[in-house]
Image (spheres, rainbow, N blue to C red):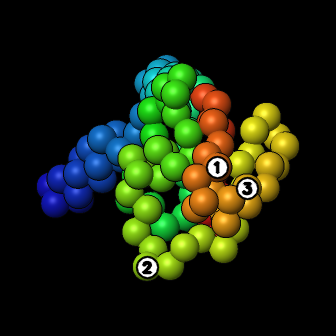
Amino acid sequence: MKLLLCWLLLVTIAIAGCTTKSAAKAQAREAYIAGQRQAFEHALQSKNSVTILGPVRNQQVPWTEDLTLAKALVVAEYYSRTNPTEILIVRQGRAITVDVNQLLAGQDVPLQAGDLVHIR
């Protein structure tokens, strides 16, 4: 009797831990769709914003037609105690170097949707 109960317990545990092929395929399909949706949303957000990497509190800044580098740094909440030593804007795969001294002197740089700004 004990042997039969042990065998039934093992079979129940084995069955409970198993997943059918169709259930596994459905789970994989749902995970794939969720990943695709997340990638699409990220790409859409990147096209409608500017990403700032460096000492800022907000890395994503919504893009507007009048957005400049100085405005983006204010919105991103630049928090370093010192001025940046280097700023690069990556636009469509090309790096644009920004002269920090000119920026601080008031020569602002317009930004485009999808720009990536590196601050060092």
Left or right for 70, reference 12: right
Q: Nearer the viewer, mark 1 or mark 2?
A: 1
- Residue extending farthest to the front is 105
Q: Nearer the viewer, mark 3 or mark 1?
A: 1
Q: CA distance from mark 2 to mark 3?
A: 19 Å
Crowding near the residue tagged with mark 3, few <14, some 14–19, many ≥20 C-alpha atoms within 10 Å: some
Q: CA distance from mark 3 to mark 1?
A: 10 Å
Q: Secondary structure at mark 1?
A: loop
Q: Residue at x 41, y 51 (%)?
A: 74
Tell me residue 118's x, y (percent): 65, 58
The residue that mark 1 highlights is 107
Residue 95 visible:
yes
**Amino acid type assigned to the residue bearing label 3 in the image:** Val
Residue 87 visible:
no
**Amino acid type assigned to the residue bearing label 1 in the image:** Gln
- Residue extending farthest to the bottom is 81
Left or right for 100, reference 75: right
Q: Residue at x 82, y 40 (%)?
A: 93
The residue that mark 2 highlights is 81
Q: Which label's residue is closer to the chain start, 1 or 2?
A: 2
Crowding near the residue tagged with mark 2, few <14, some 14–19, many ≥20 C-alpha atoms within 10 Å: few
**Amino acid type assigned to the residue bearing label 2 in the image:** Arg
The residue that mark 3 highlights is 98
Tell me residue 99's x, y (percent): 73, 60
